[in-house]
Image (cartoon, rainbow, N blue to C red):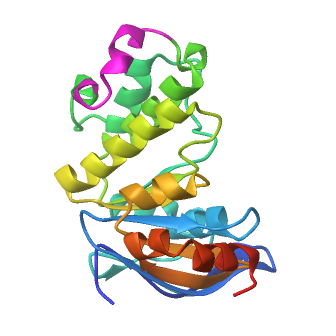
Amino acid sequence: MSGALECRGLSGGRGRVTAFRDVDLAVEAGRVHALLGPNGAGKTTFLLTVAGLLPSQGGRVAVSGVPLRPGRATAACRAGVVLVPDKRELFTTLTVEENLRVAAGRRGPDPRSMLAVFPALEPRWSLRAGALSGGEQQMLAMARALIQRPKVLLVDELSMGLAPLVVEHLFTVLRAVAADTGCAVVVVEQYVHLALQVADSASVLNRGTLVLHGPASHLSANPRHLEEAYLGTG
């Protein structure tokens, strides 16, 4: 396998508990991959392991062919891996602008450049992040990730707690970001059919094992196989 993100034989978990095992996954630059599966399948733990926030239990992760040291979040970030966590983890007492300035750093892009991607944040520019709606907070979390110019963007539960129209908009942005910036995107999502419409490829993780993998269009056209993968009956 080759690509902007490559995982080979990757296993991980928390402490002595293994949440996923022997995952092989490659996502090319400019492509979107949907990681699907039931609750408790190990999807979030997988993202945290790729991002270096949890140590791996085996296997390897590489970005643009360069291996990452397991359990080193700073090194992963420097290599271009950026995570949008499911709880967003914003600085709620800082304004929208201040959140973006912190993420951009001294030599990063102008925070206002993110308004071209998320114009809805402009009237909220001087508000504290804690005062934003759920959709606005997710836009800010995405903007905070994108301003770091990721090579690999990991998004955990993009739709959590959001209205369907907001989710559709964010997925459209995600697709455009991959195409425009050339970053590889892995999105964990429960809106299965919407995720498959946007993604180039998809996998189903069930009980810690990849049980289905292929082009998103193929998975979408075979709902019975998708259902069996989710239920573990295939």
As for residue 123 lying within the magenta part, the answer is yes
| Residue 159 quadrant | top right
Q: Can I make out residue 57 in this image?
A: no
Residue 22 coordinates in the image, percent (x, y): 59, 90
Furthest-left residue in view?
Answer: 180
- Horizontal and vertical percent position of residue 216: 41, 70
What residue appears at the point 21 percent right and 55 percent down from the top-left corner?
179
Looking at the image, residue 203 lies above or below residue 117: below
Note whether 208 is above or below 37 in the view shown.
Answer: below
Outermost right residue: 16
Give coordinates of residue 141: x percent, y percent: 47, 36
Figure quadrant of the C terminus: bottom right
In which image quadrant can residue 215 be found?
Answer: bottom left
Is the magenta region chiefly helix, strand or loop? Answer: helix
User: In the drawing, does residue 78 fall left or right of residue 166?
Assistant: left
Query: From which residue to which does the magenta span run?
Result: 115-127
208 or 141, nearer to the observer = 208
In the picture shown, does residue 102 fall above or below 41? Answer: above
Asked if the stretch drawn in magenta spans residue 226, the answer is: no
Q: Nearer the viewer, residue 56 or 230?
A: 230
